[in-house]
Amino acid sequence: MTGSGATSATGARVTLVGRPGCHLCDDARAVIEVVCAELGESWSEVDVDEDPVLLDRYAEEIPVTLVDGRQHDFWRVDPDRLRAALRRG
């Protein structure tokens, strides 16, 4: 994961931190896919269970949405807030 104000290692501006079998992660993924496609932004996804640091930090908040390496949302992704954050960046 990248530090504050940076894009992810993949160059994506949006990162979804989640885990398989998480219905809220599925909902967040659907919103992120639509918003990023609308705005031509890339996004990536990481499994919280694959990284002990992420697991320690976000285990109770997944899904977590990061924009430019900073925590933006958790549990639910508001499409309008995500659009606004991406347009500001």
Image (spheres, rainbow, N blue to C red):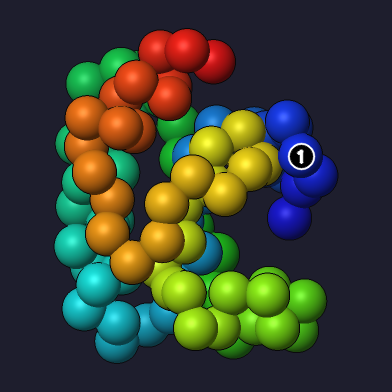
Q: Residue at 42% of width from left, 52% of height from top? A: 73
Rendered location of residue 43, percent (x, y) = 46, 40
20 sits left or right of 8 in the view: left
Q: Disc 1 marks which amino acid?
A: Ser
SS under mark 1: loop
Rendered location of residue 3, percent (x, y) = 80, 44
Q: Residues within 10 Å of mark 1 (few under 14, many from 20)?
A: few
Instruction: Using the image, determine if residue 64 lies above or below residue 67.
Output: below
Specify the quadrant of the image occupied by residue 63.
bottom left
Specify the quadrant of the image occupied by residue 13.
top right
State how many labels appear: 1
15 sits left or right of 24 in the view: right
Q: Residue at 54% of width from left, 15% of height from top? A: 89
Q: Residue at 67% of width from left, 33% of height from top? A: 7
Residue 35 in sight: no
Q: Nearer the viewer, residue 60 or 51?
A: 60
Residue pointed to by mark 1: 4
Rendered location of residue 48, percent (x, y) = 57, 77
